[in-house]
């Protein structure tokens, strides 16, 4: 969903950049409060992993592909604020080094994939987890959170395109939502797969998850 | 110099495996936004509008004919650069926290 240079007009790109800057500075403040030095290398790993995973476009229907955003994955493992920083690091490298997402659209891309995706993903995940903490619940909540996070990001993308007067909102929204409802299924599946792996190897990294002794004994 | 943890090495190794094994198999079909831009005829708005010229545009290595190899090299470079950038940013934030606590 990386917006290239040339799509957004100046006012939209500038507004998105300001909103993103405010969101990122808030997330820096929040992260600073809770950041444990020992977490830093794993934040680096998360960013590197998401960069790599974003290269793997999977086919959806009708000659279209999609790839993981990773915002929900980052939010479930590091919380929504640190996730915003992890996603921003990925997007900065992609746009400057690989021209994947325009420099002028970086604010817009950060808004979609580093702000909206992790915040919505984390919100949906927390909502669905409720007071639950089982592995099944974690994986089901993760899937839905990933799916909705992608759809939400695509909705905001459609809004940015229409504010830029490229397409009307009535056309942009169904077009973007149509494809991203499908691509979001991939996001949900990949995120749930990775979270499932983490519950086995590093359960402490999965927010709200508590290892159930009975469950793990049963699994053996 | 603190010891590098095993989980960090495993994590980076997995990321590099994805780049080497899965990324070359990635679908080259347009992604969701590109597809919408094609269907609604605004994709050409991006033509030649790049604000800067990136060193490895579209995950290709200028001058390297073999696109699969180029993609792998670009992916390895990007994975390590992203790791480095995130480490630097997180360290800066952690340092600013300590400074704040001292003042």
Image (cartoon, grey):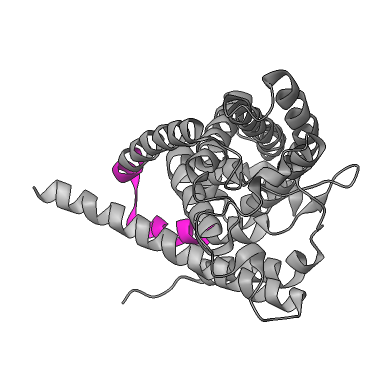
Can residue A149 be seen?
yes
- The residue segment tinted magenta is A30-47
How far from the left and from the top, in percent, is residue A195? 65, 48
Q: Is residue B17 above or below residue A187?
A: below
How far from the left and from the top, in percent, is residue A46? 53, 56
Left or right placement of residue A66 versus residue A118 in this view: right
What residue is rendered at 44% in x and 31% in y? A15
Magenta span includes A32: yes
How far from the left and from the top, in percent, is residue B53? 53, 63
Direction right: furthest residue: A62
Which quadrant of the rendered structure holds the N terminus of chain A?
top right
Q: Which secondary structure class fits the magenta region best?
A: helix
Q: How many discs appear?
A: 0
Can residue A132 be seen?
no
Give residue A48's quadrant in the image. bottom right
In this view of the protein, which residue sits in the foreground, A160 or B101?
A160
Magenta span includes A98: no
In this view of the protein, which residue sits in the foreground, A68 or A46?
A68
Direction top: furthest residue: A170
Which quadrant of the rendered structure holds the C terminus of chain A?
bottom right
In this view of the protein, which residue sits in the foreground, B18 or A209?
B18
What residue is rendered at 52% in x and 32% in y? A119
What residue is rendered at 75% in x and 50% in y? A219
What residue is rendered at 71% in x and 73% in y? B20
How far from the left and from the top, in percent, is residue A37? 33, 57
Give residue A187's quadrant in the image. top right
Left or right placement of residue A169 versus residue B38 in this view: left
In this view of the protein, which residue sits in the foreground, A49 or B53?
B53
């Amino acid at each position: 969903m990386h917006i290239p240079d040339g799509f957004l007009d100046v006012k939209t790109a500038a507004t998105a950049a300001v909103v993103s800057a405010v969101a990122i500075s808030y997330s820096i403040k929040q992260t600073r409060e809770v950041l444990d030095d020992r977490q830093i290398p794993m934040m680096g790993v998360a960013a590197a992993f998401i960069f790599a995973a974003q290269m793997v476009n999977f086919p959806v229907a009708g000659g279209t592909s999609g790839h993981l955003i990773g915002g929900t994955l980052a939010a479930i493992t590091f919380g929504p604020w640190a996730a915003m920083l992890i996603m921003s690091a990925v997007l900065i490298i992609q746009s400057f080094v690989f021209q994947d997402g325009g420099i002028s659209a970086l604010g817009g891309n950060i808004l979609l994939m580093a702000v909206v995706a992790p915040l919505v993903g984390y919100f949906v995940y927390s909502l669905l987890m409720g007071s639950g903490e089982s592995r099944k619940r974690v994986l089901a909540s993760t899937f839905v959170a990933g799916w909705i996070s992608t759809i939400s990001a695509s909705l905001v993308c459609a809004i940015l395109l229409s504010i830029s007067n490229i397409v009307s909102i009535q056309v942009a929204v169904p077009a973007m939502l149509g494809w991203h409802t499908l691509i979001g299924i991939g996001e949900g599946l990949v995120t749930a797969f990775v979270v499932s792996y983490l519950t086995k190897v590093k359960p402490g990294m999965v927010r709200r998850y508590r290892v159930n002794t009975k469950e793990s004994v049963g699994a053996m | 110099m603190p010891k590098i943890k095993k989980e960090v090495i495993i994590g980076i190794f997995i990321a590099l495996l994805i780049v080497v094994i899965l990324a070359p198999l990635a679908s080259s079909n347009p992604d969701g936004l590109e597809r919408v831009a094609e269907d609604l005829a605004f994709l050409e708005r991006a033509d030649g509008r790049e604000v800067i010229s990136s060193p490895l545009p579209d995950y290709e290595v200028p001058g390297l004919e073999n696109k699969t190899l180029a993609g792998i090299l670009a992916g390895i470079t990007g994975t390590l650069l992203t790791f480095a950038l995130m480490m630097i940013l997180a360290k800066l934030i952690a340092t600013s926290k300590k400074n704040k606590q001292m003042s």
